[in-house]
Image (spheres, rainbow, N blue to C red):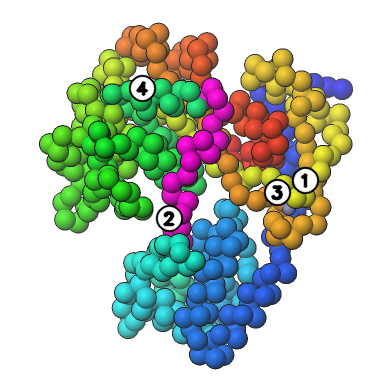
Amino acid sequence: MVVPKKQNIWELLKKELLENEEKRWYFSERFQKIEDKVKKSLKDQKTDEALNDITVWALVLWSSDVHYETFDDYVVVRFRIDWVLVDIFRLTLKEYKPILERLKYASSLKLNITTIPQDWKYSLIIENRNIDVRVSTLPVWGFENVVCRILDNTNAIIDFEKLWFFWTTKRMVEKAITRKNGMILVTWPTWSGKTTTLYTILARLNTREKKVITLEDPIEYNMDWITQAEVNDKNGFTFTNGLRAILRQDPDIIMVWEIRDAETLETATNASLTWHLVLSTLHTKSAAETLDRIINMGMKPYVLASALDTIIAQRLVRKICPYCKREKERTALEISIISNMMKEIWMSSLSSENIKLYEWEWCEKCNHSWYSGRIWIYEIISLNEDLRNLIRWWATTEEIIRKARDWDLITMKEDWILKAIKWYTTIEEILRVT
Ligand SMILES: [Zn+2]
């Protein structure tokens, strides 16, 4: 058996697992039920009921968006379940028209405007849950496509214990958020679930002895006892001047939705250096990329070393469906690749036998997708004096990360392998998103 060279391990593993993977399609007998119900309501001219059915089913199937795509003489209704788009059923243009009009009316869009894109939102209550739907239209072929983003506030804040931290990572985050000052950055590629992480941390910090102010774009969830402000670029209420205004409001904890430019970064840094705990996000993929980005935005390393406390890089991956997973026989190549991978992430003490690969059975519970729900994987770097000194002396990002590993840096790869060992998710799933 030829043991692959280190740099080829990931590529080989991807090839071996993903290319040989049996193609799966989300499918469920429930899709037919949705179609029948919606079409019956439309026939009875109950558009509200049809729309309600679609939204309820989208929620039941854990969808984040409903897409209406028009073609020559039909419209496809698709749900984004986890992050996979799934065709649910088709409508005729005649059936679609009242739905389109109803959606535009509900979200205060102009009915007579059909040739330029529009977007706004509406709220509805389903089974005591407050659901916001953000509607956006796009003119196509003389008709309009619609995408509805469903914002289900019941998941905006979850129990801190359910954020999928291991005890080591949890300890790092808890230490960071109980400090009186410093900057905590949550970094996020798309679909990382940063909203839930930030709101959950804020909920944990929210006590009557502290003043918590947020600057958001947009406010996705209203929290009790927290002052939430929404930026509005058109009116000149930007992140930068908003942040300065917040600082005059005597806060203890500040959450700035996103650091987009050097000016916001500088103001946020100054806030953290003057005894405020600052939480924010940056659009980067890893802890290393975050350090590089901050320096590239013009921040002096000695300022960064004093201001920054913790970087939490996160990804969302799909969770294994508990009803249909079965352990699979591994090939010799798979075993060899996995044990090499374990050595690479310094976990050779863990036997590669611990890594299981799965096969699935026919399962209606997860729409035959083999996944159900999502979990987070993390990379967390918490700065200590050693690391701060390295940053002050212009060390390269590689040197900083290497040193951090001597302490308690948990890399994304380590976190996900541990989660794969624990049967929370699969290796295939993580390869897909890393
Ligand atoms: Zn299943």
Whole-angstrom CA distance, mark 2 to mark 1, is 30 Å
Label 2 is placed on what type of residue?
Answer: Asn
Question: Which of the two marks, 4 or 2, is nearer to us in this view?
Answer: 2
- Closer-to-camera residue (428/48): 48
C-alpha gap between disc 3 and disc 1:
7 Å
Q: Name the mark nearer the viewer: 2 or 1.
A: 2
- Foreground residue among 404 and 31: 31
Q: Looking at the image, do the residues carrying marks 2 and 1 touch, with CB atoms under 8 Å apart? A: no
The answer to which quarter of the image holds residue 294 is top left
Front residue of 416 and 136 = 416
> Disc 4 marks which amino acid?
Asp
Mark 1 surroundings: few (<14), some (14-19) or many (≥20) residues within 10 A:
some
Residue 251 found in image quarter: top left
Q: Is mark 1 within 8 Å of ligand 1?
A: yes
N-terminal-most mark, 4 or 2? 2
- Asked if residue 338 lies in the magenta stretch, the reply is no
Q: Quadrant of the C terminus?
A: top right
Q: Which residue is mark 3?
A: 321
Q: Nearer the viewer, residue 259 or 250?
A: 250
Q: Is mark 3 within 8 Å of ligand 1?
A: yes
Is residue 349 found left or right of 217 in the rendered image?
Answer: right
Q: In the rendered view, tell whether residue 361 sits above or below residue 147.
A: above
Q: Quadrant of residue 197?
A: top left
| Mark 3 vs 4, N-terminal side | 4
Dot 4 crowding, Cα within 10 Å, few <14, some 14–19, many 20+: many
- Give the magenta-colored segment's residue range: 150-169
* Residue at x 29%, y 31% (from the top left corner): 278
**Badge 4 is on which residue?**
309
Q: Amino acid at mark 1?
A: Lys
Residue hosting label 1: 325
